[in-house]
Amino acid sequence: MRIAHLSDVHLGYRAYSRTNEHGINQREADVMRAFRTALRAILQAAPDLIVVTGDLFHTVRPSNNSLITAYRFLLDLQTQRKGAPLVIIAGNHETPRVVESGCILALLTHIPGVQVVYDQMTQLELPTLSANLLCIPSRGIGEIEQRVLEPNPTARWNLMLLHGLLEGVTPFVLERPINRQKIVREEWDYIALGDWHLYTQVAPNALYPGATEFTSTNIWDEAGKPKGWILYDAATRTHEFREIPTRPVYDLTPIDAGELTAAELNDAIESRANAIKDFEGALVRQRIYNLFPELRSHIDGDLIRELKTRALHYQLDLRPPRVGFRPGQAIPANSDSEETRLTLADEWRIFARNYLLPAEIDREAFIELGVRYLEEGEVVSPYHHSGQ
């Protein structure tokens, strides 16, 4: 059985103030375009089953435009698939706090072949595929520790669908991560996970496809990471990650302004922006560390306005010197403050920016190759896998 798995679409997501030619928030339109691209690719792949593991919508009450367009896209998809099974579970973003409020996903059950689970842990039987699906939406996570999670021995295929973060998957500490040992087990033919926005292989049979666009609260941490969906073969327990084109996101090499003149600082801001080939319409952040007040007032306002006009969003992140900072003093690698801390990748970018290279070497490609090697070589939890 071949399964198309997508998650964390976040239809209705809005950011920044730009609108498109139809008066729709540009980021909302971007998210919808990524969803449509994914559905078209999935239709071409002709899977036996499609699963969406939560946060199809960004809010409990998405905009009318997002709701109507999503319904139309899914109806068209299912019409062409002749009502083949498509299962959606609810994520935390689309789940109302009050159970009696219902869930917007219920509307989609009027589309042929679509089944939705949003209230509690539920077993779904798909007789046409000889498949059993244990569906755990966001509201059902609390049941995990009290239940025995076992496949159905009479079914040919057993799948688990879960919207939640497993312990060891994220680089940050969760108050109550989901017990990995309760979820990741060999007897499941596939464990389709959602809620983590980066493509991640937890085990050969357990995968997060990540989000289909950049919709996290901190998109800069995801800059350069692919977005897409997964095509999984349950018989061989192998998969393909199918990337989706998205609006480009860049977290530019930080600038240490501690010893720079105003002219040098403005030149560094401009040169970093101009190094991006597809800057027009991109989402861009430029961090500047150790910026003294007297230097801040000399940042070229016309330059910044031009960059903000060219990009869809240009964020100039200005950070003052830490207490006791002296020009020429390196930022301590063990600093606990995000306001002053440079990552190892940041330090590499700064070093490589000024490193003497042969003329035939593309500097930007050289820098990003180094970043990738650093990320692949990170010391991570034994529960975290890059998915590469």
Image (cartoon, rainbow, N blue to C red):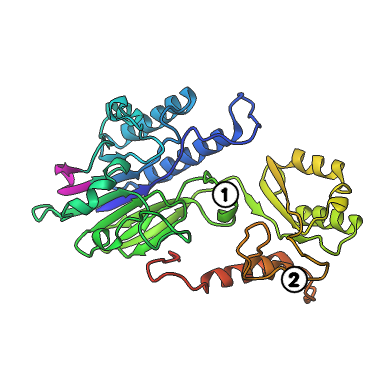
Image quarter of residue 309: top right
Q: Nearer the viewer, residue 172 or 360?
A: 172
Image quarter of residue 181: bottom left
Q: Nearer the viewer, residue 336 or 145?
A: 336
Q: Amino acid at mark 1?
A: Ile
Quadrant where the image shows the C terminus: bottom left
Q: Is residue 33 left or right of residue 21?
A: left
Mark positioned earlier in the residue sequence (2 or 1):
1
Q: Is residue 263 left or right of residue 150?
A: right
Q: Position of residue 31 (x, y in %)?
A: 52, 38
- Magenta region's main secondary structure? strand
Q: Is residue 153 left or right of residue 196?
A: left
- Picture residue at 64% right of the left edge, 26% below the top: 21
Q: Position of residue 321 (x, y in %)?
A: 76, 59
> The magenta stretch spans which residues?
122-134
Is 291 located above or below residue 204 in the figure?
above
User: Can residue 48 be seen here?
Assistant: no
Residue wearing tag 2: 330
How far apart are labels 2 and 1 at the CA level?
27 Å
Residue wearing tag 1: 219
User: Can residue 223 be seen here?
Assistant: yes
- Picture residue at 21% right of the left edge, 47% below the top: 133
- Picture residue at 78% right of the left edge, 71% below the top: 329
